[in-house]
Each structure stands twice: as C-alpha cells, then as structure tokens.
C-alpha cells in the first residue's frame, strides 16, 4: 500500500481534482489519499476566526458567505451528474451550517478556532470522495479524527494511530482508494486539534510509518526539491535523490516544498518519500531514502527572520556550568536554538522564536553579559556529503561567499550541513553566489 498526499494547490481547482482522480486510478495499487484544504481556504477560515475573536460577527458572516460562494461555484464544475452535484451541495450546506453556528458562540475561544480551521480538510475530502463515488470508484472516506491523535505536548501518538488504523483497515482494507484528511487530529481531551500549518505532509508520513507503507508520495506544484530557492535563484534544478538526514536539514532550514516534521516517521520505519509534481506527473521528482548519490554538494536553503544573541560569562576563564545554565533558560522559555558557536567565555546562538525574548534576556543578564542582539538575520544552509576526511569543502564554500560578510559558521556538527549566518540583506546575494560557486550549471 502507498500513501499519496496532495496539497492545497493540487486540489485548488475542479480540473485539478479531475487530474488527481486520473492519477490515483491509473493503476491497481492500493492507496491512502491524504488531502489538504483547497488553496486559500485555511487563510480564509483563519480570517473568519480573527473577526470572531474581535467580536465582529457581521464581518465574519460576510467572509463566510464569500467563502461559501467559492465552494458553490467549485462543485458546479467538479461534478458531472445531477446526483453528484446534489451530494456536493449537501456537503457544503452541512459544513457551512456548522461554520455559521460558530459565530453564535461567545467567547470565541481557541477550541472553536481549531474546529473552524478543520473545516477546510473536512470539506475537500468529502467533496473528493463524493466525486469518486459519482464515477463509481472503489473508495471510502476514513476520517482522520478517528485515528490521528496528539498528546498533551502536541506530539502525535504514533502507537495510537497505528492501532486505530489497523482496526479501520481490517474493516475497510478491501477498498482500492482510501481518502482521509491531512492536518487535523484530536487532542487528549477528544477535541478537534491540528498538527500545525503544513501538517498534511506530516499526516502522510505518520500514516505511512504506521502502516509500513511501500512509499509515501508528496504531490505539489513543483518538480521535486530543487538545489536552491527558485524564487530567488534563476538557475536551479531538481535533486533526484536525498537521504532522510539531508532532506530533514533542508526542510528545517527553509526548503518550502516539505514540512520539517515529515521526515521523522518515514525515517523511523524506513519508508521512502517521493516528491512529485501534480502539474507534470511524468517528471521524476525527488526520492528521499536511506541511501543516495555520492555528490558532495546537494542543495542550499535559507531560513529568514533569525535573531542572534551574544552571551559572555561574568566569570571569564574556567566558567564550568556556564553552558548548562544558559540552556536551562532557553528550555524554560521554550526557545529552540538553531546555530551555536562557543569559546571559553562566550556563546553565540541564533533563534527564530522571539515571543519570550525580553524575559529570556532579562534572566540571562542575571549571570551573563549580553551584547545587543542582531535582528533580521538569515541562516544559509548548505547540505551534502561532508565526511571528515574530505579536504577543501569549507574552502569552496568560503570562496563562493567571498565579499559577503559572514557573522557565524557552523561546520562539523553533522556530515550533512554547513550553516552560515548573514544579515538578511545579503540572503539573495549569498544564495546566488553559492549556486554559482558550488554547482555545475547548464546554460538555460
């Protein structure tokens, strides 16, 4: 069995749902199909929620009716028969009736907001399943709320998912196509919750790991993962193969095609992940697995809105316990650290979560000296095969960056990542310079 996930742009238009149907029915392979909300829907639902949190119910109703009009138009093009259209319209009426009911709840809390946002996936999957039924395909809709659950820390309960999925598949495992929702789940209280933004990728990987799938396919609107950001760099190309570790580094440090959490469950159970292009299904895409090519430099990614902190010990030399105390403060304020550089008496770290920065810095100052933070920084991450016995790798990177100021370097923590900190104003220049310096590029 395979798990195929389709994102918002892949289901964002009726003709694209038609294309997805052709893709998933082109062979006899049994598949679980994970769908995101239609493109633009999640943002629209969040906007409705903002109006309700601001106690603007009339404004929320206007936004709801505007969104419903989009869905009314969508189903008129999606279905080919009167029976199919009637079923689609009933789905929309039912779900939007629930959405309207949320406008009458005061106060509008986070619980209601999560129920509201879940409607995007509930709508897309029901509409798609009704379309498959219209065409008499052997399919079924398995609600993710019946098998996907997170714990009190917001982490997926994979054992629970595995157990519940086994039960559901025993009952419905004869179906060729099994449709379910990405992103949404339940929390320990049984309430509707989610795996955060981008979580449909994560859903697909969790399902793939739980059922020990043959392969997980993530379908988007780009031909696999590129060696650099094609929005900024002109001469990019798709990467044909990556290891789990390489892909995880790229996703974490800014490669938008893949959610950073996706790789973990797939790697845990050794399930390959293939990135494919809905608009060009014959393209090879990118395969993420345990082994890959021996190519030294694979890809570059960048992470924006980074803040750098420079911390100095008051005790100067022999300051044992210094690092422990520092990171206890970061743990207390739930602030992850991306890069770290240390010396005997000072530590430089980068963070991208600044919600508690004022309180964090105040506590650090009780036993440290702090320089003024550097804001608006960018981490440039170079990923590849950087084994310790290879000479000249750092030299190639630094030569490519000649003329661009570098604030920090992280090299040697793994054999897959060299990270550079630069000011955000140099991000585009750095990405282009590294592209030219590290890859053999074909003329367009």
Image (cartoon, rainbow, N blue to C red):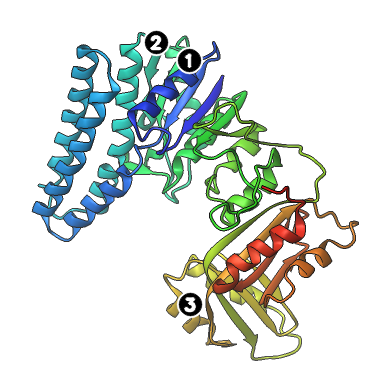
Residue 304, image x, y percentages: 53, 65
Q: Indicate the quadrant where residue 117 lies.
A: top left
Q: Which residue is mark 1?
A: 25
- Of the residues tagged 1 and 3, which is closer to the observer? 1
Q: Contact, CB < 8 Å: mark 2 with mark 1?
A: yes
Picture layout, residue 141 above or below residue 430 = above
For disc 2, the neighbor class at 10 Å (few under 14, some 14 to 19, many from 20) is some
- Of the residues tagged 2 and 3, which is closer to the observer? 2
Does the image show residue 328?
no
Q: Earlier in the sequence, mark 2 or mark 1?
A: 1
Residue 224, image x, y percentages: 60, 39
For disc 3, the neighbor class at 10 Å (few under 14, some 14 to 19, many from 20) is some
Residue ID at (15%, 55%) = 107
Q: Quadrant of the N terminus?
A: top right
Q: Contact, CB < 8 Å: mark 2 with mark 3?
A: no
For marks 1 and 3, give the CA distance.
Answer: 54 Å
Q: Which residue is mark 2?
A: 137
Viewed as shown, does residue 71 lie left or right of 144? left
Viewed as shown, does residue 189 lie left or right of 210? left
* Frontmost residue, 148 versus 7: 7
For disc 1, the neighbor class at 10 Å (few under 14, some 14 to 19, many from 20) is some
């Amino acid at each position: 069995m395979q798990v195929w996930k389709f994102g918002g742009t892949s289901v964002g238009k009726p003709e694209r749902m038609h294309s997805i149907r052709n893709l998933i029915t082109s062979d006899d392979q049994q598949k679980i199909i994970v769908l995101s909300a239609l493109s633009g829907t999640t943002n629209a639902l969040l906007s409705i929620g903002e109006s309700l949190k601001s106690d603007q119910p009339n404004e929320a109703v206007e936004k709801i009716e505007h969104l419903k009009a989009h869905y009314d138009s969508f189903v008129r093009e999606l279905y080919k028969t009167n029976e199919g259209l009637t079923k689609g319209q009933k789905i929309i009426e039912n779900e939007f009736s629930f959405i309207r009911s949320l406008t009458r709840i005061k106060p509008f809390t986070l619980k209601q907001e999560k129920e509201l946002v879940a409607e995007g996936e509930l709508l897309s999957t029901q509409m798609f399943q009704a379309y498959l039924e219209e065409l008499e395909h052997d399919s079924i809709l398995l609600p993710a709320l019946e098998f996907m659950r997170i714990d009190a820390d917001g982490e997926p309960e994979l054992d629970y998912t595995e157990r519940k999925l086994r039960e559901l598949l025993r009952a419905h495992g004869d179906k060729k196509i099994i449709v379910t929702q990405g992103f949404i789940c339940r929390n320990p209280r049984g309430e509707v919750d989610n795996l955060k933004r981008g979580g449909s990728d994560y859903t697909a990987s969790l399902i793939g790991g739980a059922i020990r799938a043959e392969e997980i396919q993530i379908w988007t609107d780009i031909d696999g993962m590129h060696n650099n950001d094609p929005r900024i760099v002109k001469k990019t190309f798709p990467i044909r193969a990556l290891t789990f570790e390489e892909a995880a580094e790229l996703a974490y440090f800014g490669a938008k095609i893949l959610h950073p959490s996706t790789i973990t469950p797939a790697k845990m159970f050794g399930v390959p992940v293939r990135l494919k292009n809905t608009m060009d299904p014959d393209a090879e895409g990118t395969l993420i697995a345990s082994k890959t090519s021996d190519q030294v430099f694979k890809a570059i990614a960048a992470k924006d809105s980074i803040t750098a902190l420079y911390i100095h010990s008051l005790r100067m030399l022999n300051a044992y316990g210094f690092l422990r105390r520092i990171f206890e403060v970061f743990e207390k304020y739930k602030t992850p650290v991306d890069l770290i550089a240390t010396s005997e008496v000072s530590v430089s770290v980068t963070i991208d979560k600044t919600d508690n920065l004022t309180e964090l810095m105040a506590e650090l100052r009780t036993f440290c000296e702090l320089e003024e933070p550097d804001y608006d920084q960018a981490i440039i991450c170079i990923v590849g095969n950087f084994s310790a016995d290879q000479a000249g790798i750092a030299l190639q990177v630094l030569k490519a960056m000649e003329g661009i100021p570098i604030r920090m370097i992280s090299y040697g923590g793994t054999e897959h990542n060299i990270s550079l900190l630069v000011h955000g104003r140099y991000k585009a220049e750095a990405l282009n310079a590294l592209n030219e310096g590290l890859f053999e590029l074909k003329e367009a």
